[in-house]
């Protein structure tokens, strides 16, 4: 005789369906993963790598020996990660209502990230950026505060102005280069003019990006192309000043010209939203080539190639995360 003990001792929780519990747990885990991924998307990781290149180029211009003491460099890399990440997060915070109409797939309008959560994340990143810079010097901290303030000014007001918007964003990027120079504070008074090149470069990208959604004006594209040509001329001028590095600098300048000028010319000829988006994407990622050229101009070919190795990393991340 075989006894059915389950009938004698029934389950203490007969109403629980174990497969459904597992499914609920998996759903919660998936939801949390999607939310985490959305907040990571807000920081635009591919762009952050370009900010690293700014700092490394500034360090090269300062003459600081990284191999002798790498710790201040690491602090500045962390600082620019927080500053850039926080700035682009707040860009989406301020643009949430506009994105709900023009880019509903973005993390905040799609509901994958909350506006409040993004505000907390952006604030935390900016604070990390300033505190990390303070570990290097008071000059570094002052520049970091300036970058954070400039980023918020651009996100809230600057981007809506046709002249001051590009200038505002360019100044933030130029200050990021000087953040690297601040690793050796006395060099700031001698190297401040270097910020003019990334200021002009970013002004060109920001100007042409205004037609990214609905298409742009040819006149704006021509202005952006002139600004980009000015940047190329400035880089050649730097190579000429440091004549011992002029020959190694030339391939970097050629690479930058091919990567940036060709899509800009295409966007000027046909200012469609798609062509403009391609030009902006190429311009942003090519910031690494710009900084590699800087690095080569002041520290030689090996340092320039070291900075250039960030380009494939940024390109790979750009395939996963939005750049614009």
Image (spheres, grey):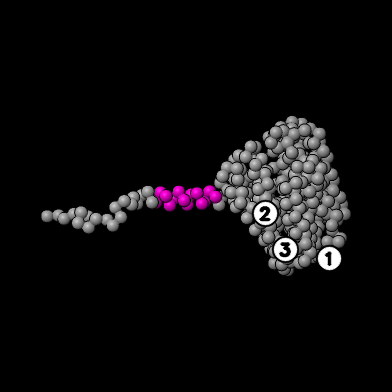
- Determine the residue positioned at 72% across, 41% down: 280
Which span is picked out in magenta?
A: 22-35
Is 27 colored magenta in this rendering? yes
**Which of these two is toward me, 55 or 217?**
217
The residues bearing labels 1 and 3 have C-alpha atoms spaced at a distance of 16 Å
Residue 197 appears in the rendering = yes
Question: In the rendered view, does 124 fall on the left or right side of 192?
Answer: left
The nearer-to-camera label among 1 and 2 is 2
Residue that protrudes farthest toward the left in the picture = 1
- Residue closest to the far bottom: 68
Q: Which mark is on residue 133?
A: 3
Judge the density around disc 3: few (<14), some (14-19), many (≥20) Cα neighbours within 10 Å: many
Tell me whether the residue at label 1 lies in contact with that at label 3, contact meaning CB atoms closer than 8 angstroms.
Answer: no
Identify the residue position indicated by label 2 in the image.
86
Q: Is tag 1's residue or tag 3's residue first in the polypeptide sequence?
A: 3
Tell me the quarter of the image containing the N terminus: bottom left
Name the residue at 83% across, 65% down: 186
Disc 1 secondary structure class:
helix
User: Where does label 1 land, which residue?
Assistant: 186
Between 242 and 138, the residue placed more toward the observer is: 138
Front residue of 78/258: it is 78
Residue 283 colored in magenta in the image: no
């Amino acid at each position: 005789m075989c006894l059915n003990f389950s009938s004698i001792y029934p389950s203490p929780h007969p109403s629980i369906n174990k497969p459904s519990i597992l499914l609920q747990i998996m759903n919660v885990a998936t939801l949390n993963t999607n939310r985490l991924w959305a907040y990571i998307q807000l920081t635009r990781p591919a762009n952050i790598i370009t900010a690293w290149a700014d700092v490394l180029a500034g360090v090269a211009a300062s003459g600081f020996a990284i191999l002798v003491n790498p710790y201040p460099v690491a602090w500045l890399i962390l600082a620019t990660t927080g500053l850039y990440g926080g700035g682009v997060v707040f860009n989406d915070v301020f643009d949430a209502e506009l994105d709900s109409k023009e880019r509903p797939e973005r993390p905040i309008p799609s509901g994958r990230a909350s506006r409040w959560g993004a505000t907390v994340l952006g604030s935390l990143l900016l604070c990390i950026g300033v505190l990390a810079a303070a570990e290097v010097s008071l000059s570094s901290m002052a520049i970091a505060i300036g970058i954070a303030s400039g980023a918020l000014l651009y996100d809230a007001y600057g981007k809506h102005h046709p002249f001051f918007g590009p200038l505002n964003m360019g100044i933030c990027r130029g200050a990021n280069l000087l953040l690297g120079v601040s690793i050796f504070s006395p060099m700031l008074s001698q190297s401040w003019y270097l910020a003019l090149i990334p200021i002009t470069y970013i002004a060109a990208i920001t100007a042409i990006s205004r037609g990214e959604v609905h298409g742009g004006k040819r006149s704006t594209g021509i202005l952006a192309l002139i600004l980009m040509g000015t940047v190329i001329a400035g880089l050649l001028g730097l190579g000429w000043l440091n004549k011992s590095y002029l020959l190694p600098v030339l391939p970097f300048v050629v690479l930058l010209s091919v990567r940036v000028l060709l899509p800009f010319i295409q966007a000027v000829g046909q200012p469609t939203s798609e062509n403009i988006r391609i030009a902006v994407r190429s311009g942003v990622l090519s910031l690494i080539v710009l900084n590699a050229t800087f690095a080569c101009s002041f520290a030689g070919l090996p340092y320039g190639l070291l900075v250039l190795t960030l380009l494939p990393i940024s390109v790979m991340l750009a395939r996963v995360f939005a750049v614009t």
